[in-house]
Amino acid sequence: MSCIKDSYMEYSIMTTNRCNLRCSYCINSAKRGKAPSLKASAPKIIKHITEDSQKNHYDPVIITFYGGEPLLETEFLREIMDGTRKINPGFHLFTNGTLLSENNLPLLNKMNMISISMDADSEIYDSTRGKGTHKKVMDNYLKIRKKLKASTLAFVTLTLKSSLYRSIAGLTDHFDNVFWFLENSGTEIGIEGFLKQYDSDLDRVLSRWMANLRKGKVLNLVPFQGLYDVIMEKHVYSGLPCGIGENYQALAIDGSIYTCEDSYHNKIGDMDTGADMEKAHQHGKFVICGSCAVKRICAGRCVVPHLNFSPAKVEFYCKCSKMLIEKFMSALPEIKKIVSTGKISENQLMNRITRFTDVIP
């Protein structure tokens, strides 16, 4: 497989500011309690995506429904999907899973990927999202799982109280893909304990992944597959691995266009005048990265901590990234050998879903 530089564009739409949960770690949760219900303009979004993608010859085009909780606005989703049909985009949905149901199947089965928040084990999950939420989401999902046509992604957000191993244990039995992400939070309480646990958990998770590879089976754990993608230079990222800088536009409710829907730090246009992707290249050259040996791989991970958190917390994320990368690098020679023997093919190991996640936890 040769090295490629994708010309895709992902348009991430903040469908609504409404959400039926108040997750303790959510960076937008505090804004939602007293905020009026706001909705984006579907006609403006359809016009912008259609004209922008055709003008720039983006291929493929991915439209991601983000929130708030997108399934609170199903008619809006249908309007966008119907209105952009002629450019044949792929559709991704990010949902908390509480509204998954048989009634939504016709809509859900128009998606290419459905990402469901499955944070931690049930105890920690309920402590951040509300008592009984974990069971409700899993019950909803399992009832429709066999009828879903979309590829599913379990999106696991780790807090400083979480264990990676416990959080993802069993998820590969129910989801097509699993991705974990370290919560973006300024808190520094519990850092050392988390680092110790994360070190141990990464060993256990990587060991299990490798054991399956030796048997000719690929568990779709996105961070490992994403690292193979980047390290082996199968894909060239010109910005951050999440897409900021080249392949991503965040469409805000008010019609503004940003490089990231989690920080809204870099406005690159609006839906009336279009997006200036030259401004998107200003994704961040982070001081802490300097001449770091893994800078090419993680590129600083995520812009949010660099903009908002203390140097100590940014250093924490760096330690986690280095830990993950170093452990994966130690396993890479064996991974290459397994591929070279044909026990698994490189196409099996590669996972295009990785390019529509943050890649680096």
Image (cartoon, rainbow, N blue to C red):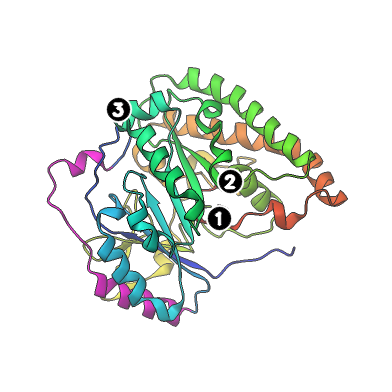
Amino acid at the residue labelled 3: Lys
- Name the residue at 20% across, 43% down: 31
Q: Main secondary structure of the magenta part?
A: helix
Compared to residue 189, the image places residue 132 above or below, namely below
Compared to residue 262, the image places residue 257 above or below, namely below
Q: Is residue 192 magenta?
A: no
From the top left corner, tell me how far across and down residue 83 is, in percent: 33, 76
- Name the residue at 45% across, 57% down: 244
Mark identifier at residue 131? 3
Compared to residue 268, the image places residue 140 above or below, namely above
Q: Earlier in the sequence, mark 2 or mark 3?
A: 3
Mark nearer the viewer, 1 or 3: 3
Amino acid at the residue labelled 1: Ile
Q: Earlier in the sequence, mark 2 or mark 1?
A: 2
Mark identifier at residue 343? none
Span of residues in magenta: 28-56
Residue 273 in view, yes or no:
yes
Mark identifier at residue 353? 1
**Circles 2, 3 touching at the beta carbon (< 8 Å):** no
According to the picture, the residue beneath numbered tag 2 turns out to be 222
